[in-house]
Image (spheres, helix red, strand yellow):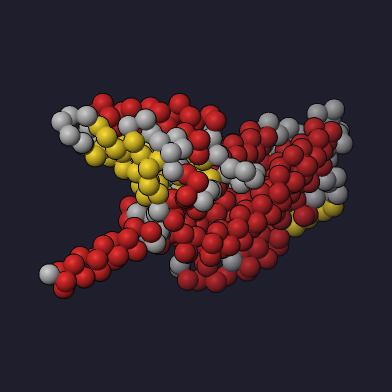
Amino acid sequence: MQDTVAELEESRQRYADLYDFAPVGYVTSDEKGCISEVNLAGAALLGMERSQMIGMPMSVFVDKGNVKLIFNHLHSCKQSGETVVTELKLSSKNAKVVYAQFITMIVPGVGSDVTQYRTIITNITGIRNAETEIACLQGTEKALLASEERLKYYASELVSTNSELKAFADIVAHDLRTPMVNLKGFSRELGYSLINLKDIMCEIVLQLPENSQKKVKELMESEMPEALKFIETSVDRMSRMVDSLLKLAHLGRRKMIYNMVDIGELVANIICSFHHQIEMHSIHMDIRPLPQIKTDQMAIEQIFSNLLDNAIKYLDTDRQGEIRLSCTHEGDEYLFSVEDNGCGITANDLGKMFESLRRVGKQDVPGDGMGLAYVRVLVKQLGGKIWCESEPGVGTKIFFTIHNGPLQTEEHRGL
């Protein structure tokens, strides 16, 4: 008999230890919600010595704005007879905000009357803070996407006059570059905060229910790092876009310097710079006689360089590549053409190919979508026009006109 009593006492003591030293709070309350029993974790979480808590209503320990929620929580448990889960903000004597998850079930007494509630209280402040950080990161992502759309809008509004291009460059440099620097800096700070948050959460996570542990792990190890990586790559991409647009604006403002240029010799030098690509892909180059004209050498060199680079990149790998350069003229206006037998461009994309930040055709070809936009601006600076003819699977012809010497009209003077 004594052995049985001793075993029962030992078992009771083990239960008491498990109850008192559990990592989550256990609270037993009567039908009115007044506390009749609480373990050490519950007392610590609710912020009072447990001997002083006996007989106090549970509503005392939640934030004033959540008092109605705790009453509804207990009432719902009583009415349904089922376990009820509610997230509540606890009251705090300091400025620290604590969020807790209340899981309550009823303990039926004699008959059908409810005599007790049993509540498990878990500190979920870490999870709520992590969710707030995720929301912040997602908001930053949206801001990045909005900025990128605004950047494309600015590009589409690019105009040819010096004053408008200068204003555009100022907008890009100030309104977009400054926020990007801030975004990169704050995302780096969020990265450091995430590392610190992981260290803080290591011990707290082990005290949470299994499903909450899984959720925290997913937030800390997957969603938040992915969001930060998205911000980093988006800022880098936007930075390159801004640099390209500033270069475009600079090209539009640069004063043309006219000298006699041997176009044949200039094109031969450009082809030499592409020698490796031409040899590697066995490209046949057909260069017809090209003239000497009075023009800006730097501009015309970049025009041909970009057009040849584009033609080489978009050749069809299923057949031998062919590129042809030719020129005709009428008076002082020269018409150049760059023709290839590459992949070609659809009719829907033809009108977009000279736009800033636009890429048409194959998307696996490296580039920033600015090469033909540079060409368009430079051709216009030289008083010419540019257009394209293309057929998918057949090839592309790009035509542009250049005047021999500067045009002295109001439209082009000072460009």
Q: Specify the quadrant that holds the C terminus.
A: top right
| Residue furthest out toward the left | 1
Q: Quadrant of residue 216?
A: bottom left
- Residue 54 at x, y percent in the picture: 44, 43
- Residue 40 at x, y percent in the picture: 44, 56
- Residue, x 54% and y 62% (percent of image)? 200
Q: Is residue 410 above or below residue 336?
A: above
| Residue 349 seen from this side | no
- Residue, x 60% and y 58% (percent of image)? 193
Instruction: Left or right? Give the position of 279 relative to 415.
Output: left
- Residue 58 at x, y percent in the picture: 44, 37
- Residue, x 68% and y 35% (percent of image)? 154
Q: Is residue 44 above or below residue 21?
A: above
Q: Nearer the viewer, residue 145 or 336?
A: 145
Instruction: Left or right? Give the position of 409 relative to 330.
Output: right
How many numbered tags mark residues here? 0
Q: Which of 218 and 226 is in front in this view?
A: 218
- Residue, x 27% and y 29% (percent of image)? 78
Q: Is residue 161 above or below residue 9?
A: above
Q: Quadrant of residue 302?
A: bottom right
Instruction: Left or right? Give the position of 94 relative to 27.
Output: right
Q: Nearer the viewer, residue 310 or 368?
A: 368
Q: Nearer the viewer, residue 153 or 336?
A: 153
- Residue 133 at x, y percent in the picture: 55, 47
Q: Specify the quadrant that holds the N terminus.
A: bottom left
| Residue 220 seen from this side | yes
